[in-house]
Image: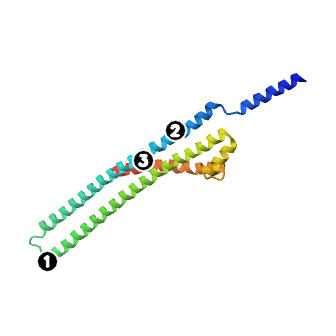
Amino acid sequence: MRTLRNIMAGAMLIALSACATPPEVKQLSTAQIQYFGTAIEAVATQSEALVLASTKIQKQAEERIAKREADSKTQLVSLLSDSNKGDSAAERKALAEKVLKASASSTQSAAAARAKLQQDLDAIKAKSEELGQYISTMKDVQIALDAYIQSEKAGEKIVTSVLEQPSVSHLITKVQKTIPRVTGAANDLKVLLTGLDG
């Protein structure tokens, strides 16, 4: 009987030790939170650099648009002055109307190009913010995991009070909704950056 108790007690100890989280896993989990903190800083710095580069590209593109617009006006003035000699009043009027129409079209085209540049820059800023929010969400997930590794009660408390989520399943849903948006944001950024340069 005593041997049976010893065997049962040994089995219980083995079962309990198998359920316990090894200290290295707890340390790794805590370190992962710091890694996410560093990643958040890196993504923020990278996003800032991306926005600065995009702003520079936007400025260069606007300068090219302004140059094209100025060249177009110069060509129109040249056309008007070269063609205006010896023409009748009706011919000069028709030419002036043609020049005004071409000038208006050039101005509209330049304004549309500038608006598109601004729209692209705003989209780059928004997509960069989405990526930062994703990393922040992943840090929240790691905080919840870390707390649950320490103890289930601590995990529940962290999820509800610190992360302000009603349950872990809500946190999972939040992550599942975020992943496609982040993938889309990364792809959109690539397209936007390619469009800005061209």
Identity of the amino acid at label 3? Ser
User: Horizontal placement of 74 versus 136: left or right?
Assistant: left
- Measured along the vertical axis of the image, is residue 168 above or below residue 115? above
Residue toward you, 109 or 41: 41
Q: How crowded is mark 1: few (under 14 residues within 10 Å), some or many (20 or more)?
A: few
Q: Residue at x 44, y 46 (%)?
A: 44
Q: Residue at x 9, y 70 (%)?
A: 85
Dot 3 corresponds to which residue?
A: 47
Residue toward you, 43 or 106: 43
Q: Residue at x 24, y 61 (%)?
A: 69
Q: Which residue is drawn at 91% across and 24% down?
A: 1
Check disc 3 and report its element: helix, strand or loop: helix
Q: Quadrant of residue 109?
A: bottom left
- Measured along the vertical axis of the image, is residue 41 above or below residue 102? above
Residue 35 — which label? 2
Q: Do the residues labelled 2 and 3 touch (CB within 8 Å)?
A: no
Q: Where is residue 127 in the image (x, y as percent from the top left)?
A: 46, 52
Dot 1 corresponds to which residue?
A: 89
Residue toward you, 192 or 174: 174
Cα gap from disc 2 to disc 3, whole angstroms: 18 Å
Identity of the amino acid at label 1? Ala
Q: Residues within 10 Å of mark 2 (few under 14, many from 20)?
A: few
- Of badges 1 and 3, nearer the viewer stands 3
Mark 2 or 3, nearer chain start: 2
